[in-house]
Image (spheres, rainbow, N blue to C red):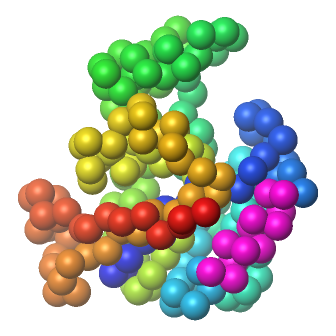
Amino acid sequence: MESIYLIRHAKAEGQEPYASLTDEGCSQAEKLADVLSGHGISYIVSSPWKRAVQTAMPLGAAIEQHIHTDERLQERVLSTRDLPDWLDVLKRTYEDEDWAAEGGESSRVAAARALALLKECWRRPERHGAVVTHGNLLSLIIRYYDPSFGYAEWAKLSNPDVYVLKREQESTSEEEYEEGKQPAISRLWLD
C-alpha cells in the first residue's frame, strides 16, 4: 500500500462492544464515505465492534468493497474494573507505556497489536486502504509515528476523525520502514 487512512468511528451511544452509532453518528458515517470515496481506497479493515463496522459500512457501499474485521483493531482495554477516575488512569498510560491498570493493556501492548495489523496492510497489493478503529487505539498508532502525540492530543480527537499515513516514496521497501524510515502522517478530518 501507498497510503493507509486511519479512521476513528463516528459518534456512538456508548463504549461497550455492541454500542451503536447515534443518529448523528450515522450521518457522520455517510459524510465520511462521501469525503473518502474519492481517495482510491480499495481495502477496508475494521474493528469488529459495532460502532466501527457501522462507520465503515457507508464507505464500503460507496466504493463497493467488503469490510474485513480484525480483533486487533478493537479498543484498548484500560481495565477490567469500573474506574471512576478513568481519565487519570488513561493519562498515566501515556506517561508510562508499560504500565497497565488491573486487567488492562499497557499502551505498548495495545499499540503492538494494531501495528502488527498495519504492517500486514503495508504489504497488501492495494494502493490505498482504510483502517477503522477507536479513539484510544488510534492515538497509540499515531503516537508510534509521531511521539509527541499524547493524552492532550487524544482528548482533541473528534468522532469521527481521520489521519493518513503516506509512504514518501513509492519505491521504498517494507524493510526500509522496519529500519526506521516512517511514512508521513497528517490529519485529514477537520470537523
Residue furthest to the front in view is 191
Q: Residue furthest right?
A: 23
The C terminus is located in which quarter? bottom right
Q: Report whether residue 138 is seen.
A: yes
109 is higher (above) or lower (below) than 38? above
Q: Is residue 93 above or below residue 113?
A: above
Position of the N terminus, as image quadrant, is bottom left
* Residue at horizontal 36 percent and vertical 66 percent from the top: 186
102 vs 6, nearest the viewer: 6
Is residue 29 found inside the magenta-colored segment of the image? Answer: yes
Who is closer to the viewer here, 111 or 140?
140
Which residue is located at x 38 percent, y 76 percent?
3
Q: Is residue 132 visible?
A: no
Q: Give the number of marks.
A: 0
Q: Quadrant of residue 18?
A: top right
Q: Is residue 165 magenta?
A: no
Q: Which span is picked out in magenta? A: 24-35
Give the overall secondary structure of the magenta segment. Answer: helix
- Vertical arrangement, residue 138 with respect to residue 81, above or below: below
Q: Position of residue 126 (x, y in %)?
A: 44, 85
Which residue: 73% across, 86% down? 62
51 to the left or right of 40: right
Horizontally, residue 122 falls left or right of residue 72, namely left
Task: Measuring from the top left, give residue 53's x and y in whole percent.
Answer: 73, 59
Question: Which of 77/139 is in front?
Answer: 139
Query: Residue 183: x percent and y percent?
Result: 24, 67
Side (left or right) of 171 relative to 35: left
- The residue drawn where x is 74% and y is 34% is 15
Residue 123 image-quadrant placement: bottom left
